Amino acid sequence: MTDSYVGAIDQGTTGTRFMVFDHDGQVVTNAYERHEQIYPEPGWVEHDPIEIWENTQTVVQDGLADANLDADQLAALGITNQRETTIVWDRETGKPVHNALVWQDRRTTDRVEELEADGKVEEIREKTGLEADAYFSATKTEWILDNAEPLKMQSSRSRDLRDRARDGELLMGTIDAWLIYNLTGNHVTDVTNASRTMLYDIEAMEWDDDLLAEFDVPHEMLPEVRPSSDEATYGSTDPDGFLGAEVPVAGALGDQQAALFGQTCFDAGDAKNTYGTGSFYLMNTGEEAVASDNGLLTTIGFQLSGEPVHYALEGSIFVTGAAIEFLEDVDLINNAAQTAELASAVDSTEGVYMVPAFTGLGAPHWDGRARGTIVGMTRGTKKEHIVRATLESIAYQTRDIAEAMEADSGVETTSLRVDGGAVKNDFLCGLQADVIQTEIARPEVDETTALGSAYAAGLAVGYWEDLDSLRSNWQIDETFTPEMDPSQADAMYDRWGDAVERSLDWAQED
């Protein structure tokens, strides 16, 4: 099988990537295409599903062409995706009825507050492992069925949309389901993505009838839920389609679970943090779904064919890499790489704290009305201080999660595996080690979301034999150890808590 490979489609918040991996887990080719971010109103975030599908085809074709590979050299395709982002589309035409509502979208915050007022939060947490939040797919699907743009012309048509959904004419899904549908014609999702909808019972392992009734989401529009690595496969690409080959689509994981899998966190207690648009800290808890008392989510980590589910504790941070993009948007930096240079040009922030709550705060605060805040500025504050404060905010938010994770699991973190675009920044990795006071391990292949979905697909078709063969692929690029005095780290972190307090419950007008 020296001439065969596994492909991974990594559909993220800001763009779509296609990567091909060999048996050693090394990258053979890598193609990327950005897509438009649509902000119809403050707090609303949308993507065009058609653009995403067109970009997916483009990056797959470009990646194969760049490496001079034929599609029939792909043993399998895996998919990883921005989670919770929700699409409703027409089963027959394949056309979306509305733009995708992105995981960052806050338009259903009022609906979540209704759930809180009605005392539904605990039931939702017990069944789904999730906090009631606009982050997840349930309220997004409900909103689309009530408000899809083509139906606003006639208010009576809103009922028609729900009737069509009940008749099975409309389908819903997260981005993985949208891509699998377009690649294979089958309506399938995996257990990790299902667990992020706020409609799926993660212990009964089925769509929950009570939650479907609460959000008026008809069962007929839901995808079939399958293992993350599926020997039966989700289907194959059309040999007459854009690839020109019949390639099995055999693995799918939400991006953060894919990173957990790609970092080979296969055993209980293994943990990783991915630094992307947001940051997501996951710890494998094995076959036990550990309930959180500290604002974390209980979620499905992965499932292999014929095996029990592995669960995870998760801390979801909504804005980290997006905070760097903000600095670029307001012309404080020219590019992300410049942050290390500017931040290291000053010894400290001189008391400046930046809380990047642009779309509310996730774990452990769960405040949908929190908003971005910069505090502690003086007339002597320079852009270097603000840039450094922004990088520090990423480290502080991660410590928020690390402390909650230790409290819930009883496991002390001695080494944290990190990945994602931001970990190329050595300054940030060193800062992270200082703030958490633990070792940070950066792997050679830092695009571990794509790698994890490739591993899942490759295992399903026998390209890799077992988990041990994947463990041997994981190699450390660099390790960062704490250099800051623990008392200084604690003092800086304590002041961070004061800054967060000032960001909470700000957006009363939304």
Image (cartoon, grey):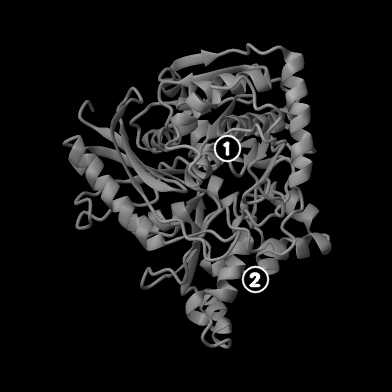
Between disc 1 and disc 2, whose residue precedes?
Answer: 2
Residue 185 spot, x, y in % from top left:
35, 60
Rate crowding at label 1 as few (under 14), some (14 to 19) or many (20 or more) other CA atoms within 10 Å. many
Does 215 sit above or below residue 450?
below
Task: Report whether 499 appears left or right of 423.
Answer: right
Which amino acid, mark 1? Ser
Residue 449 spot, x, y in % from top left:
45, 36
Residue 94, numbered circle: none
Q: Quadrant of the N terminus?
A: top left
Q: Find numbered disc 2 in the image and state the secondary structure of the residue it sits on.
A: loop
Q: Residue 352: which quarter of the image?
A: top right
In the foreground, 44 or 103: 44
Q: Is residue 236 visible?
A: no
List the residue tagged with mark 2: 216
In the foreground, 408 or 166: 408
Does 259 sit above or below residue 96?
above
Residue drawn at (53%, 33%) of the image = 274
Residue 297 spot, x, y in % from top left:
69, 42
Residue drawn at (51%, 81%) of the image = 151
Residue 70 spot, x, y in % from top left:
18, 41
Q: Find numbered disc 1 in the image and state the secondary structure of the residue it sits on.
A: strand
List the residue tagged with mark 1: 279
Q: How many marks?
A: 2
Q: Do the residues labelled 1 and 2 touch (CB within 8 Å)?
A: no
Q: Residue 198: which quarter of the image?
A: bottom right
In the foreground, 12 or 176: 12
Task: Report whether 136 appears left or right of 260.
Answer: right
Which amino acid, mark 2? Asp
